[in-house]
C-alpha cells in the first residue's frame, strides 16, 4: 500500500521542521518544501542519525514566486498518486509601528504569509478534490485573532488567513476536504529572530515610538521562558492528520491562548485597552 503523503511548506526550521519529523514517524511520506536549499545537506545528515532519511524528501519552493509554484505543481503535485495532507507553514514576521513601515514591507509580508499560502493551496486542491479527501492545515496565530502594537504587518496577514480559511473550509468540505486553522501563541521558533524584520525607523531613538518599542521588546523578552515547544504543534497536526475527519475549524495551542481569545471577545474594548497599556506602557 502507498503511504499517505504530506506536503509541508517552510519545512527547513521551526514548526515546519518538527512537523515533518512527527508526520514521518507516524507513517507519512513527507515532501518537505524549502526555500533555501543550502540548508538541505545538514537536514539530511540529521535525518540519517534519527533513521528518517527514507521518509522525508526535500524539494525547492518559494511560495512568493509564480515560476516556483508552477514547477511545484508540475513536477511534484501532478506526479503524486495521492496527497493526504498539506501544511501551509511558510511565513515570517515583519514588525515596527504602522506610521513608519513602508507599504512595500506590508506587501512582502502578505506575499509570503497570505498570497503564498493561497498559491500553494490552489496548486494542491485539484488533486485533493478529484481524489475526494484531504486535510489542509493553515498556520495562523493568536495574532490572527488579536491585534498587537508593533506587529501590524504580521497581524494583518494572519487575520487574512483566518478569513480565507473559514471561507475555504465551507467551499471544499462537500468534496471531502477539511481545512483547519492552527492558532499558536508564542513558541520557541526563529520566526522572532532570523525571520523577523523590524523596520529600521522604529529602532531609531529619533522615532516617536522608540520608547514604546523598547517596552514591547522588554515584555517579549521577559516572557520568553514561557514560550511553548514547537513539538506540541507538530503533535497536534499529526494527531488531526491521522483522524478520519476534523470537526473543528480552529485549534488553539499554547498557554492561555484560548482564554485570552475568549476574554477579548467578551469584555468591553476599553477594558481590553486598559489591560494592554498597563502591561506595555
Image (cartoon, grey):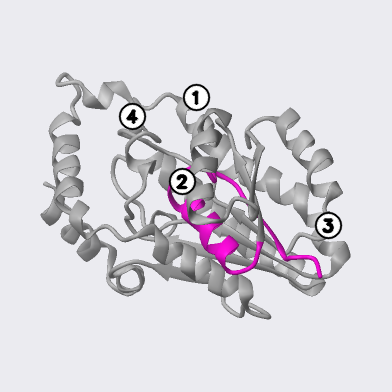
Q: Mark 4 points at which residue?
A: 99
Whole-percent x, y for residue 71 in the image: 78, 34
Q: Which residue is drawn at 86% across and 66% down?
A: 131
Label 3 element class = helix
Q: Mark 2 points at which residue?
A: 156
3 and 4 marks in contact (CB < 8 Å): no
* Sequence-wise first label, 4 or 2: 4
* Sequence-wise first label, 3 or 4: 4
Q: Residue at x 50, y 63 (%)?
A: 182
Q: Mark 1 points at which residue?
A: 104
Tally of marks = 4
Whole-percent x, y for residue 239 in the image: 54, 74
Occupied quadrant, residue 247: bottom right
Whole-percent x, y for residue 109 in the image: 49, 35
The label nearer to you, 3 versus 4, is 3
1 and 4 marks in contact (CB < 8 Å): no
Q: Label 4 crowding class (10 Å Cα cut-off): few <14, some 14-19, many 20+?
A: few
Q: Residue at x 58, y 33 (%)?
A: 35
In the depicted structure, whether residue 204 falls above or below residue 215: above
3 and 2 marks in contact (CB < 8 Å): no
Label 1 element class = helix
Label 2 element class = helix
* Sequence-wise first label, 1 or 4: 4
**Which dot marks residue 127?**
3
Q: Label 3 crowding class (10 Å Cα cut-off): few <14, some 14-19, many 20+?
A: some
In this image, 129 relative to 212: left or right? Answer: right
4 and 2 marks in contact (CB < 8 Å): no
Amino acid at each position: 500500500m502507498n503511504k499517505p503523503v504530506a506536503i509541508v511548506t517552510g519545512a527547513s526550521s521551526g514548526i515546519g521542521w518538527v512537523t515533518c519529523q512527527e508526520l514521518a514517524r507516524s507513517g507519512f511520506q513527507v515532501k518537505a518544501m524549502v526555500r533555501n536549499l543550502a540548508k538541505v545537506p545538514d537536514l539530511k545528515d540529521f535525518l540519517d542519525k534519527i533513521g528518517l532519511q527514507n521518509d522525508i524528501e526535500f524539494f525547492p519552493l518559494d511560495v512568493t514566486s509564480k515560476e516556483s509554484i508552477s514547477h511545484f505543481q508540475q513536477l511534484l503535485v501532478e506526479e503524486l498518486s495521492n496527497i493526504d495532507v498539506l501544511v501551509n507553514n511558510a511565513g515570517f514576521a515583519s514588525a515596527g509601528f504602522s506610521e513608519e513601515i513602508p507599504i512595500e514591507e506590508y506587501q512582502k509580508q502578505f506575499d509570503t504569509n497570505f498570497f503564498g499560502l493561497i498559491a500553494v493551496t490552489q496548486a494542491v486542491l485539484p488533486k485533493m478534490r478529484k481524489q475526494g479527501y484531504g486535510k489542509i492545515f493553515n498556520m495562523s496565530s493568536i495574532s490572527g485573532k488579536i491585534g498587537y502594537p508593533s506587529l501590524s504587518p504580521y497581524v494583518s496577514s494572519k487575520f487574512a488567513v483566518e478569513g480565507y480559511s473559514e471561507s475555504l473550509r465551507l467551499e471544499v468540505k462537500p468534496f471531502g476536504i477539511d481545512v483547519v486553522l492552527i492558532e499558536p501563541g508564542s513558541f520557541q521558533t526563529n520566526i522572532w529572530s532570523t525571520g523577523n524584520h523590524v523596520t529600521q525607523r522604529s529602532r531609531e531613538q529619533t522615532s516617536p515610538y522608540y520608547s514604546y518599542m523598547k517596552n514591547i521588546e522588554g515584555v517579549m523578552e521577559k516572557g520568553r521562558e514561557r514560550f511553548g515547544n514547537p513539538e506540541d504543534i507538530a503533535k497536534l497536526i499529526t494527531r488531526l492528520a491521522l483522524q478520519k475527519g476534523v470537526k473543528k475549524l480552529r485549534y488553539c495551542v499554547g498557554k492561555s491562548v484560548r482564554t485570552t481569545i475568549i476574554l477579548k471577545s467578551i469584555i468591553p474594548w476599553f477594558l481590553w485597552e486598559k489591560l494592554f497599556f498597563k502591561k506595555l506602557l
